[in-house]
Image: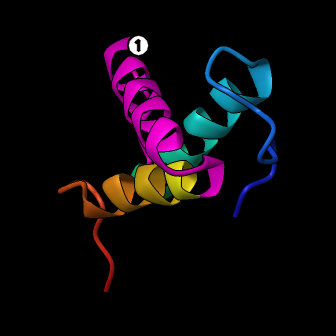
Amino acid sequence: LFGHVDLSHRPGDDAFTEELHALHWRLLATELDPLGQAELEVLWHAVQVEEDAASAWRTVLTVLLRDPGFVSY
């Protein structure tokens, strides 16, 4: 699922940004706008501070999967 990052990447890294955009496109079929990117980065950072990078990515992925634009049949 993750093709551009490993657990060492952080918000602000090119690979991190590329991964957010790729996940958003793959799951929601829409481009990630700057506000959405900033919100996901803040969320990722908040979880990473409290837990770890793996938990932060799980949280971001969960948020994307719960987005109303994500439909699975």
Q: Residue at x 48, y 30 (%)?
A: 45
Please state the total of marks drawn on the protein image. 1
Evaluate whether residue 66 shows in this view. yes
Q: Quadrant of residue 2?
A: bottom right
Q: Quadrant of the N terminus?
A: bottom right
Amino acid type shown at disc 1: Pro
Identify which residue, 27 or 38, lies in the foreground.
38
Q: Secondary structure at mark 1?
A: helix
Disc 1 marks which residue?
A: 34
Evaluate whether residue 26 shows in this view. no
Q: Residue at x 47, y 26 (%)?
A: 41
In the image, residue 66 sits, relative to residue 53, either above or below, namely below
In the image, residue 20 sits, relative to residue 34, either above or below, namely below
Q: Residues within 10 Å of mark 1 (few under 14, many from 20)?
A: few
In the image, residue 49 sits, relative to residue 12, either above or below, namely below
Q: Is residue 48 magenta?
A: yes
The region drawn magenta spans 29-54
Left or right: 43 with respect to 66? right
Question: Whole-percent x and y of residue 39?
Answer: 33, 25
Question: Whole-percent x and y of residue 62?
Answer: 38, 62
Of all residues, the one furthest to the left in this rendering is: 68
